[in-house]
Image: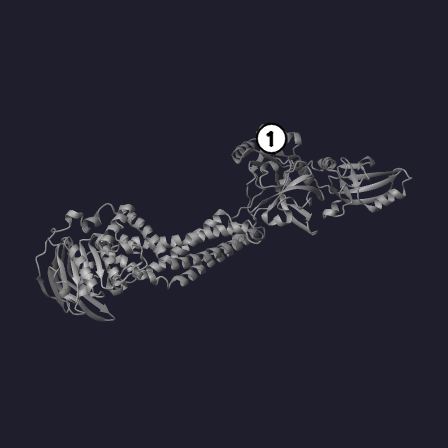
Amino acid sequence: MALLQLKDIGKIYVSEGNVAVGIRGVNLSFKLGEFVAITGKSGSGKSTLLNVISGMDTYEEGELYIEGQSTSHYLQPEWEEYRERYISFIFQDYNIIESFTVLQNVELALMHIEDKKQRRERALALIDRVGLTSHLKQKGSKLSGGQKQRTVIARALAKDSPIILADEPTGNLDSQTSKEIIALLKEVSKEKLVIVVTHNFDDFKECATRHVRIFDGAIESDHIVSSPQYIADSMQSNGATVQENATAPKKSARFIREVKNGFTLGKSIFFAKPKLSVFLCLLLIVGALGVFFITSSCALGLNALIGQNNMFNYLEGRVVATNDDGTPLTDEEVAQIAQKYGAESYIRFDSILDASLGVQWKNHEGYFSSIYASVDFINNYSNQGVVGKMPQEPNEVLLYFPISYKPEFGEQEPLIEQIELWSIGNGAIYKVTGVKYYVDNNLEPKIIFTDEGLELASLMRASNRSYLDIYVKQDGEVVWSYENAMAAPCFDVEEGKIYINAYSYHDFMQANSDLNLQTEISIYGFDYLDSSYITLNEPTKWPEDYGSNNYFVYISPYLYKEIAKQSTTEYRQFSLFFANDSEASAAAEKMMEEGYIAVLSNATYKTDGIDTILNTILGIFALVYWAGAIIFLALFINLCTQRSIEAFKNDMAIMRAMGITVTAIKTGMYARMLIAIIPSYIAVILTAIAIFFNPVANAIFTFLYAWQYALMFVGLLILVTFITHRQIKKLFNTSVKKSLKGGGVA
């Protein structure tokens, strides 16, 4: 049985309504061991016949048999496998992949060998066989014509295909090189079927075993020149036929091998064209950074679209609770509840945990600055990274602020000595012992108290007694008064005392020092504090020096606490703290069963309709803006790279003609883009680190979370996939034959 048989083969070309016959009525059969020379005038159909035999071109009439199996029903995958298994090419214009080295060109034909070490050894042996060991790492573009043809022959031998097709293999070579190439072909023909198309039969008459002449698309003559030494009737002994392979149950294994080969190919393609790859990487880096900055500018809107509305400030293990009938609880009752449910601690007056405290300070340049901050427990923070030290006393605090405040608050020691918290009383002054910085500028700044300080501040925050009435009496009669005087706690006032900061009061008392005067202060729920609570000793530091209003009355904090207790009797809510949310959740469920209303601090609520609409509009606008930027970027990158893709068109055609599957080639192109996008990911990460850890930049750009980086990276991946898909479509919309320089490859 013949290895290859053509029975009444006809090829017809149709172009713009014109019909041309390429070949007609061709009947030929070939066996292993034959060296067939095909001659004929230009346009006679020699190359068309070779293209049909190779499977790079279709036939419209007759039947082509390979090892007795019909091929008329073949689709692209079967023709790919046919070329991979049976065909190697050597053509006049070489069609070497010029960006690949000699070694890479040869190894390309050895991709069926999975072991890289074996692949390399086989390639080196073949390169040595054609005398190119000294040019191993030289790129194809730097080789002479003879060296290119030798490389192509080595590549053809590397495939170990039973059929070698050569179209004018010596057409562009000098006579000496031509003789060397013919000698190589003669050597390999002893174990292959070699079919050579040539204009000059005399060059091959010494090695040809058969001479076929074509005229006007038909076989004019076919005669034996010398008796060939046939190897075998078929390739059955060398493995399964294509037909058998096509229906074999190992398609998944073949697909995996093709994908693996594709990644290997993609790596080679990427590094083979360094200038083009560097340009692509830089383009993607610019694009990725553009996406990064756009995402940062859209972050607030995107957060509004998916963000939750928390009822409370979330703290790990916190349960917010109250009686289901709304009746207030005493300190003792809250303590008993905490003990009953196993809470580690509790705060009865917990509104401070959910408040945004107004913070004001005078910076080192003498200007007043202000911001809103929440509060937290000191035991939630370590002293690692603290500028200064952790607070120890009730009047000391740690500032936990974004890194953008580092120039303001200092890097080595705190530059701010004191701050005023407006929402504690009418304003309380605290000493700043340390500052700790964080990079996530979406988070609200925090004031960190000691445990005792937080308990004291929570009670003062819960009190609504910020005003009082001052009366000076003589023998029970009011002789001087000031009603609704503003009051504030002050740690610098002697404990248990009140300092009246009013010039008119001091002037009056001094002018009437000889009289029997008594000062009384009326505070709702704590009426008529007498003169024993009044001190004329001024605070050691005036609060107004740090931005405070000129309050009329300053009260020592613990006295303020006692006064506050009288006005917070109706406070109904309290918070319990457990080791973690799991314990807190179990305790909350049990409390609900036993007559309390209890929820975790991550409980959410639904906003009213207007807020929901506004947040949705803001989020959708941000999302559309972000998606539009991605699309624009995709079009921009595609526009910048569409010309460069032409550099791959011929290379891809060479690979397809070699029998490298479309799956492997496409995977290689995708792999190339995946490699190219890696530097852009790295650039984004390094840029993010540089920006968010830089105080000045941190104040400008919105911090991004992991899901936003994931969104960016997925967006970039979709972008390059889209671009690669368009490029691949452009590469594969032309037949192999038309894509090749000179019509074929080795």
Between 651 and 360, the one nearer to me in the picture: 651
Direction from residue 477 to residue 397 in the image, left or right? left
Residue 594 can be seen, yes or no: yes
Residue type at mark 1?
Answer: Ala
Residue under pointer 1: 338
Q: Where is residue 736 in the image (x, y as percent from the top left)?
A: 26, 61
Q: Position of residue 460 (x, y in %)?
A: 69, 39
Number of numbered callouts drawn: 1
Q: Quadrant of the C terminus?
A: bottom left
Residue 616 can be seen, yes or no: no
The quarter holding residue 561 reads top right
The quarter holding residue 523 reads top right
Residue most toward the right?
514
Q: Position of residue 200 (x, y in %)?
A: 15, 67
Between 496 and 321, the one nearer to me in the picture: 496
- The answer to whether 513 is drawn above or below residue 730 in the figure is above
Q: Is mark 1 on a helix, strand or loop?
A: helix
* Residue at screen point 72% across, 47% down: 546
